[in-house]
Image (cartoon, grey):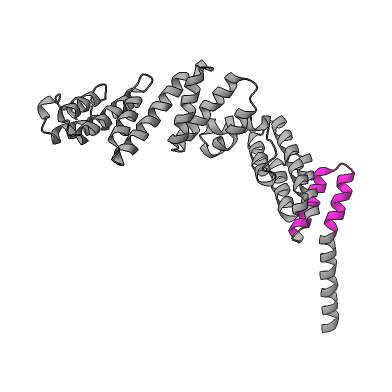
Amino acid sequence: MSRWSRAAALLLVGVGCTRSAADHEVLGDREYAAGQYRDALAEYELGLRATAGSAALHAKTAAAALHVGEYTLAVAEYRVLAEADKSRADEAADGLERVASAALQAGDHTALGAALSGLRVVAPNRPLGRYARLVALDAAAAGDVNDALAYLPTAIATSSDARTADSLLFLYGNAALGAHDCNTAVVVFEGVLRRQRQGAVLDAAREGLARCALVRGQEALNAGRAAEAEDWFRRAATPGATVDVARAAALGLGDVQLSRGDVAGAVEQYQQAMVGGLPGDSLSLRARQKLEALGRADSLPPANPQ
């Protein structure tokens, strides 16, 4: 075979391969029309691998993936559709809602969360409704504070009754606490306690409020605002706080008193911080160090043997 013949043959092979790649979408359409969604999806994916893929091909891939339960792939393709063609954002959002519904029925909360995350990006003003509550509860249970904070407001707003709303509001406060946003958490916990509509979470809300009050007190003390710090530390030590939070609040109150020159008051609080602790725990050690620094070792109980 001559050099020119070989070149012509290679050219024909290349053209044939290009045409075959372009035909994957057509082949996929035939399979889709025949209800062979798995085969259709395979053809569409081959088409996407062969070329960059048009918005239409991404839409078809998403629809086929949804039909066969490939929800994560469907979410990804609907998001690409919205990015590739802004005029089809509503179509992509509708598709993501269908994925969310199917994932909910299948009990696939991971895919449900992915679909709702996609909706927040593609159609941020579209209400998430009942789906938000499920994702929010999953996120809260898993300790995923970012998703919990993202979905709980919608879940609260669409709650069916006041008791459910307060349960979700408590979870929102917990998520804010987990995100170290005590400004938000304090307001939320106070709201739950003020309304008294969900007795099952009241004790936990008091404990959360005490923890945040401790954080706010330390922040105020570090900033030199002794009066504000004292108010927060006293709130942290109120009924509902755990023993460790109350002891830490006493330690903080001792620091407040010391900043005012009230040594006797500081000693009293430092001694209180040692009550109820385990041998050698960090709060007891810190209180002991502060008392020793004040020359009040005579007020200390015997050191715990190590």
* Residue 49: % across, % down: 74, 58
Magenta segment includes 41: yes
Give the dominant element type of the magenta stretch: helix, strand or loop: helix
Query: Does residue 48 show up?
Result: yes
User: Could you say which is closer to the camera, residue 207 or residue 8?
Assistant: 207
* Residue 45 drawn at (x, y percent): 76, 53
User: What is the quadrant of the N terminus in the image?
Assistant: bottom right
Chain part drawn in magenta: 23-49
For the point 65% across and 28% down, the residue is 158
Q: Is residue 95 above or below residue 51?
A: above
Can you see residue 305?
Answer: no
Which is nearer the eye, 191 or 118? 191
Q: Is residue 212 left or right of residue 68?
A: left
Instruction: Quadrant for the C terminus, please.
Output: top left
Residue 149, picture quadrant = top right
Q: Residue at x 79, y 40 (%)?
A: 67
Residue 61 lies, with reference to residue 52, above or below; the image says above
Q: Where is 293 relative to 242, above or below?
A: below
Q: Quadrant of residue 160?
A: top right
Q: In the image, residue 65 lies at what x, y percent?
A: 76, 44
Q: What is the count of numbered marks?
A: 0
Any magenta on residue 40?
yes
Location of residue 229 in the rendering, given as x and y in whole percent from the top left corner: 31, 33
Q: As displayed, is residue 147 above or below residue 267?
A: below
